[in-house]
Image (spheres, rainbow, N blue to C red):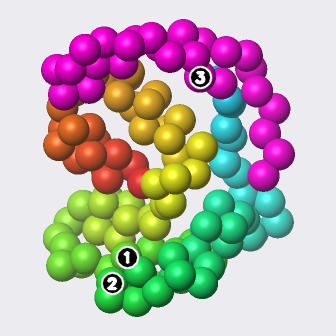
Amino acid sequence: MNLKGLGEESVNHGLLGGIERAKKHQRYHINLSNVDGNYNCKVQEESFQGEKMQCLKSLSTFKDADGILRIKTKLLMREDNENFKVPIVLPSDYHVVKNLILCKHQDLGHPGARSLMAALRENY
């Protein structure tokens, strides 16, 4: 994926009450859209191959109508957001995913790890 950076931003990190450290990060603007009725999920294609795909074998995964890899949960009968009931599988080591986590962490006012993960699961 070839993303154009919007420049660097210095961010103070202090997740879980540790010592705060300033780090510089690239900023990106990401716009996901539907083109000709097809969604393109290159992040999953690039990340879940070979050994990493084997890690997903123990989970109940499937590709939805748009070709996006999701996990079936026990919450299927619950009335809730579709992304919460069948979350999208995202690679933790991908720079775009790391930036999504960082932005959500900042937007929520630097919550704890569990609160952050719960908020992320509602959207992804």
Residue 71, disc: 1
Q: Residue 41, can we see it?
A: no
Q: Residue at x 67, y 72 (%)?
A: 45
Whether pointer 2 and pointer 1 mark residues with C-beta atoms closer than 8 Å, the reply is yes
Q: Position of residue 20 (x, y in %)?
A: 30, 12
Q: Residues within 10 Å of mark 3 (few under 14, many from 20)?
A: some
Q: Nearer the viewer, mark 3 or mark 1?
A: 3
Q: Quadrant of residue 78?
A: bottom left
Q: Residue 108, can we see it?
A: yes
The residue lying toward the viewer, choosing from 3 and 85, is: 3
Q: Residue at x 20, y 66 (%)?
A: 79
Instruction: Determine if the magenta segment contains residue 18.
Output: yes
Q: Which residues are magenta?
A: 1-26
Q: Nearer the viewer, mark 2 or mark 1?
A: 2
Residue 59, disc: 2
Q: Residue at x 21, y 38 (%)?
A: 113
Q: Amino acid at mark 2?
A: Leu
Q: Which element carries disc 2, helix, strand or loop?
A: loop
Q: Nearer the viewer, mark 2 or mark 3?
A: 3
Q: Earlier in the sequence, mark 3 or mark 1?
A: 3
Whether pointer 3 and pointer 1 mark residues with C-beta atoms closer than 8 Å, the reply is no
Q: Residues within 10 Å of mark 2 (few under 14, many from 20)?
A: few
Relative height, residue 12 to residue 60 (above, below): above
Q: Which residue is mark 3?
A: 25
Q: Position of residue 83 (x, y in %)?
A: 38, 61
Q: Which element carries disc 3, helix, strand or loop?
A: strand
Q: Position of residue 89 (x, y in %)?
A: 46, 66
Q: Amino acid at mark 1?
A: Ile
